[in-house]
Amino acid sequence: QVQLVESGGGLVQAGGSLRLSCAASGTTFLIGAMGWYRQAPGKQREVVANISRGGSTNYADSVRDRFTISRDNAKNTVYLQMNRLKPEDTAVYYCNAERRFPPSYEYWGQGTQVTVSS
């Protein structure tokens, strides 16, 4: 099993920055790609960014050029650097990890709140 624990959320003014961290523990050799999702009140959960085990990244159009995802495989940790935050970035941010080997499975963290005030 894999456990994911997020940290780094909080309240920030528009234009500010936050850095989220997600530490994985347990059977971490099972982890392949990792990513961040978010869910705002009344909306569906959406992908923010993901990163492969080798470091290839993908971003949602809404955050590209403002957010940067990175990972440290030695520490089993993925990060999300969020710059130039906007009120519409307000959401609960969830860490996600995909299992490398069959059967396919996704692990989720408990979520961390990010609130951007205008």
Image (cartoon, rainbow, N blue to C red):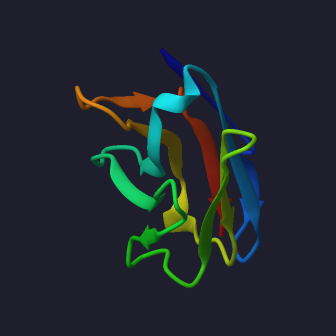
Q: Nearer the viewer, residue 10 or 77?
A: 77
Q: Name the residue: 31% across, 44% down.
A: 42
Q: Nearer the viewer, residue 94 or 74?
A: 74
49 on left or right of 46: right
Circle count: 0
35 on left or right of 42: right
Image location (x, y in percent) of residue 113: 61, 41
Q: Residue furthest bottom?
A: 65
Image location (x, y in percent) of residue 6: 65, 35
Q: Residue furthest left?
A: 103
Image location (x, y in percent) of residue 8: 75, 45
Q: Quadrant of residue 50?
A: bottom left
Q: Name the residue: 73% across, 43% down.
A: 74
Q: Name the residue: 69% across, 50% down.
A: 20
Q: Nearer the viewer, residue 12 or 54?
A: 54
Image location (x, y in percent) of residue 99: 37, 34
Q: Is residue 118 above or below residue 54?
A: below
Q: Is residue 110 above or below residue 64?
A: above
Q: Quadrant of the C terminus?
A: bottom right
Q: Is residue 106 above or below residue 57?
A: above
